[in-house]
Amino acid sequence: MSTIPDTPIDPRALSVLQQVFGYEQFRGQQGAAVSQLIAGGDALVLMPTGGGKSLCYQVPALVREGTGIVVSPLIALMQDQVDALTELGVRAAYLNSSQTLDEARAVERAYVTGQLDLLYVAPERLLTERCLALLDRGRIALFAIDEAHCVSQWGHDFRPEYMGLSLLHERWPHVPRIALTATATAATRQEIVERLDLYEAAQFVASFDRPNIRYRIVEKDDVRRQLLAFIKNEHAGEAGIVYCLSRSRVEETAAYLAAQGINALPYHAGLPAPVRAANQSRFLREDGLVMCATIAFGMGIDKPDVRFVAHIDLPKSVEGYYQETGRAGRDGLPSQAWLAYGLQDVVQLRRMIDESDGDDVHKRRMGAQLDAMLGLCETVECRRTRLLAYFGQQIGPCGNCDTCLTPPEAWDGTVPAQKVLSAVYRLWKERGQRFGAGHIIDVLRGKKTPRVDQHQHETLSVFGVGADLSEREWRSVLRQLIAQGLLAVDHDGFGTLALTEASRAVLKGEHTLMLRRESPKAAARASRSEGRAKPAAIALDPADEAVFLALRAWRASVAKDHGVPAYVIFHDATLREIARARPGSLDDLAHVNGVGDRKLQAYGEAILEQVEAH
């Protein structure tokens, strides 16, 4: 790993930051990364979603001679990225399959003649001989490889086309490169370095923490009802994303929410391309829309005012979960990451791993990633502490997650665990049978069912020994035993349960097993989904709120005229600052974060009129 050079911030970079982007100073390690690129060095940048990664290559591209080439994996989002830069007066364009031949040729001419500051290209197009030959005809300022975790087979979003990007260094050895991602463990980071030949690159690793996001994980209990209560009681009228594991679940959830009065749309790879594009465009441009989606949706989403990200199925890895939750609250305002998961999620994902086409190494890797995700769900410690530790960052309790706000109870579950393991053992040893969780719970609780009668399981010594716990409590016990590797999901495709090597120590009483149980207060809160109180730090007094709402209405009108999302004109955070500051002149307005020279010239007088009128 290369050390971060102690390079002073290039004054040209600071000038671009202030005049073009409207920010007074760089944040954190942005300035050092920018200076590294301007000086011609390579960089690997790890910053959380919303942490300002794009400035790390946009500013150097405007300072260095030539055009910055940005490798971006999502064609659908290039237009919005280019629109946002164009609003700032930056000469930006993209090349992708959505363009006509004439449109593409116009962009190519602009590049060759030096009329572009930034050019966005998808990796599969970039690596064609025609595109490589085109790049040879112009002057390249730098290469920016966005979403660099896609190169890593350890990561959660591996894309084979990223594997060929080492060619950039081979073909243009003197052009600086910057690889950027929001999520990477040490293993993923090392693979990025190896795959992209970034051994000499300086690494800029910012804090992964997003303190404005509140993490909450609840046990499933009619998850659609839980989701509806969460949205209606805590995020009514606000933008959000609901992630589902399957396409059918996406469509069912979107239809259910829409029927309940929530403005919700579906998004998954199986929808016709025009429908996907239209739904994504509506999400970016409309206020308060909820997108129900598979993980195919979201990478590169720049919408700053997503107030919540909800998962109604268990994510496959902590990296994927963190990347997806990071799409909430990019504007720094309070937001929530809400996850509901249950025993069936664990069984289903274990079975998917076992039935996958990968080799044993791949299956072990997937299993380890799932184990880490389950550990996050079942922890009695601070969620954020556990989450950031996965990425190698140590912090104390955050005070802004469910386990900090309503701590769960840790209880001695050794005896209940022994009862479960004994039931699984006796069903197999005495009857040669294996069953799923539901039937095992029926046997433990002494419940007479047709299946119990059919197999005469009421004659077993374990029948009825668990009548002291409810079905929900037993499901929690079983879920945690699977999570801890004390029970295994069998390979038969039916989700039946079997003992593991680790089961023996618990059965023999050689191991005390502490389990997690929600406190009564937490359970009550989850069932009624209490409304949140917005922190006073972001509240506006009534007079300022009126100015803010007037500015939002004005912004919506401008955005509609320009055919771009409202946040491309100004972020809410900028409008809030204007409402508080009440600038009386263009000079005053120029000192507000997010108001650069181009926007001051284009919108300054109109903003001052809105402030004065209200």
Image (cartoon, rainbow, N blue to C red):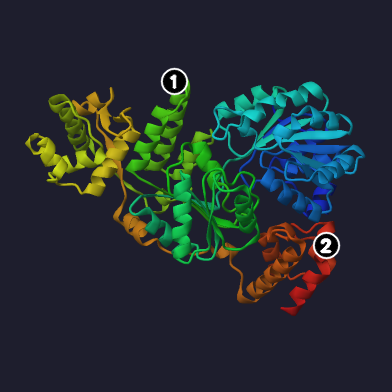
Q: Position of residue 526 (x, y in %)?
A: 36, 57
Q: Residues within 10 Å of mark 2 (few under 14, many from 20)?
A: many
Which residue is denoted by mark 1 in the rendering? 360
Q: Position of residue 226 (x, y in %)?
A: 39, 57
Q: Position of residue 553 (x, y in %)?
A: 68, 71
Q: Which numbered tag is attached to residue 575?
A: none
Query: Could you tell me which quadrant the N terminus lies in?
Result: top right
Along the line of sight, which residue is nearer the eye, 393 or 233?
233
Which residue type does callout 2 highlight? Leu
Along the line of sight, which residue is nearer the eye, 344 or 415?
344
Q: Is residue 439 above or below residue 233?
A: above
* Residue 509 showing in the rendered view: no
Left/right placement of residue 86 relative to residue 392 reads: right
Count of numbered marks = 2
Q: Secondary structure at mark 1?
A: helix
Q: Is residue 333 above or below residue 613?
A: above
Which residue is denoted by mark 2 in the rendering? 600
Q: Secondary structure at mark 2?
A: helix
Q: Residues within 10 Å of mark 1 (few under 14, many from 20)?
A: few
Q: Residue furthest left?
A: 459
Left/right placement of residue 395 relative to residue 55 reads: left
Q: Which residue is painted at 46% across and 21% down in the image? A: 359
Q: Which residue is painted at 61% across and 73% down in the image? A: 541
Which residue type does callout 1 highlight? Asp
* Residue 458 showing in the rendered view: yes
Q: CA distance from mark 2 to mark 1?
A: 58 Å
